[in-house]
Image (cartoon, rainbow, N blue to C red):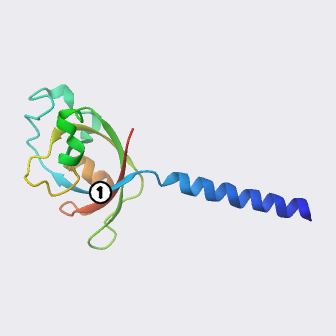
Amino acid sequence: MGVHIMRIKIALVSLFLLETSIVFGDIGTATSYNPPYTPTRCNGNRGDQFPAGNLFVAVSEGLWDNGAACGRRYRLRCMSGSGRWPCKGGTIDVRVVDYCRKRPCPSTIALSSDAFSEISRSPNAKINIEYIQI
């Protein structure tokens, strides 16, 4: 009986550690922005700056880092937003190609319309995201 209880305790502790290790990112907001996407502040009119699937972003002042953000990659997921069921499940990996074009930037990260549609069902919404640099 004692061994069985010890195994249950170990399993519960393991589940707790696994669950807490999943939440590791920063919290912010995301909006969508539409073409034209060039010129960008990172690479001007170069077509090769855009990753496959057009999963790229423009970042706000807080992430821009005086241009050092160019090329950085982030993994992000939708957490919540307005309307019913604004989020799709899963995560996406995106690349920074630009500085947010609007002043002030309406969100922490502005996703290309293709990237935004991968994580949100609401194309014109402002959503809450979790993100981490990868």
Residue drawn where x is 65% and y is 57% of the image: 15
Q: How many numbered tags mark residues here?
A: 1
Tell me if I can see residue 79 in this picture: yes
Q: Relative to the observer, which residue lies in front, 83 or 66?
A: 66
Above-or-below relation of 39 to 125: above
Please name the residue that numbered disc 1 is placed on.
28
Q: Quadrant of the C terminus?
A: top left
The one nearer the camera, 25 or 122, is 25
Q: In the rendered view, would you say 98 is above or below 114? A: above
State the residue at coordinates (26%, 47%): 115
Residue 95's quadrant in the figure?
A: top left
The picture places residue 116, in percent across and down from the top left corner, at 25, 52
Q: Which sits in the foreground, 123 or 15?
A: 15
> Who is closer to the viewer here, 44 or 59?
59
| Amino acid found under the numbered disc labelled 1 | Gly
Quick check: 23 left or right of 105?
right
- For residue 60, say whether it is visible: no
Where's the N terminus, which quadrant? bottom right
Q: Kindly identify the residue that appears in the image at 29 percent across and 35 percent down.
A: 72
Residue 33, given in percent of the width and then of the height, sits at 15, 51
